[in-house]
Amino acid sequence: MRRGNAYLLLVVLGAAVTVLTVGVAYFLFPYPPMVEALQALNSSNTVLYSFKDRTHTFSTRGESKVGVIFYPGGLVDPIAYAPLLRELAMKNLSVFLVDMPLDLAVLSPNSAAAIIERNPEIRVWIMAGHSLGGSMAARFASKNQGIVSGLVLLAAYPASMDSLSESDLHVLSVYGSDDTVLDKEALEKARSLLPEDTKYIVIEGGNHPQFGYYGPQKGDGKASISLLEQQKITVDEILALIEQIMQLLFVRSDKMTESIRSRPLDFLARVEEVTVRKSTTSILLWRSAEVDRFSGFICPVLMKKYATQRSQVNVQTRTRMPFYTPDLAQIISLAATNISIREEGSRNHQSLLYNELKKR
């Protein structure tokens, strides 16, 4: 090949690589956050902000037992969701905003697992996400139904492979009436993939990007309500979902405590029944009541009884019992060494519980 032709070939290849690089960079360049979003990245008297391990964390200065893990929309800078999530944190929640690889949640749908592992003090987990992030949040929830209690979908729906129709999850689906980015026909079809009691909220005048602070989005309709209005409605609906979950898990514990004290054997039979059914909601209910009210006595006794059938208390137990924490592991260990329960001895099991409750 002549030197001139070789040079020309190099020039053409160089130009092609440049065009390809610029094209890919343009396609993968995320929507940048607005100034208001950047201003939300700070601590205050009520909220602590930090960034570590690709996670923005907004936590309350008080003790929080509820955690919200948020997956951003595809090709949207995660910081764009900081104002929305900061508002949630101000309501005594711990909120975790994941910085996804290349700003695409589909590349790391299991990011929530590490966050949950690092925060064992949090008892109730809510998955949430916008657009593609919502779909991937649904994927994580579908594979971790023993850990996740709720799911929030903002202009999103689960993929067909991630059906939650038979789950005990509490699900909230929110989208704007003027959202033309969202495939609403697919959204309607996806209703069959969610629990029957899923709550659907259509924000009149809302659009796709106003769930975050990143400005107009290509291909979307123009909102007829302000960004602040759409954000407030979204925050209120998310808080309502969490309140519903917390009422189910904790508010009833006072009545249950009185019931346990007056009729412990009847209560035990009821607990064993729901445990056999492996109903996540019911297990959470008695876990919160007994461990908090009776210094961890009833729960480890029951857990030991069923865990023994699986040879040991291991990760499977944690998956089934969302409230399983290191302190509970220690209680189970003490129960195993100090309390003798025969597998076949149902009467002995009930008598032990009854005698212990009479002392309290």
Image (tube, rainbow, N blue to C red):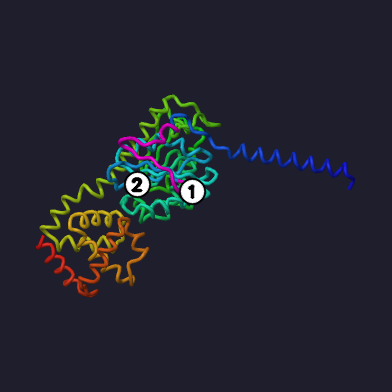
Q: Is residue 35 above or below residue 281?
A: above
* Residue position marked by numbered label 1 in the rendering: 159
Kind of element beneath mark 1: loop
Circle 1: residue type = Ala
- Nearer to us in this view, 173 or 352: 352
Query: Residue at 30% of width from left, 68% of height from top?
Result: 307
Position in image of residue 340 (x %, y %): 20, 73
Q: Depth-wise, is mark 1 or mark 2 nearer the camera?
A: 2
Tell me how far mark 1 sits from mark 2, CA to CA.
Answer: 24 Å
As drawn, the label of residue 295 is none
Over which residues does the magenta segment extend? Answer: 38-54
Packing grade of label 2 (10 A; few <14, some 14-19, many >=20) is many
Query: Residue at 16% of width from left, 72% of height from top?
Result: 348
* Residue position marked by numbered label 2 in the rendering: 67
Position in image of residue 80 (x %, y %): 46, 35
- Nearer to us in this view, 266 or 100: 100
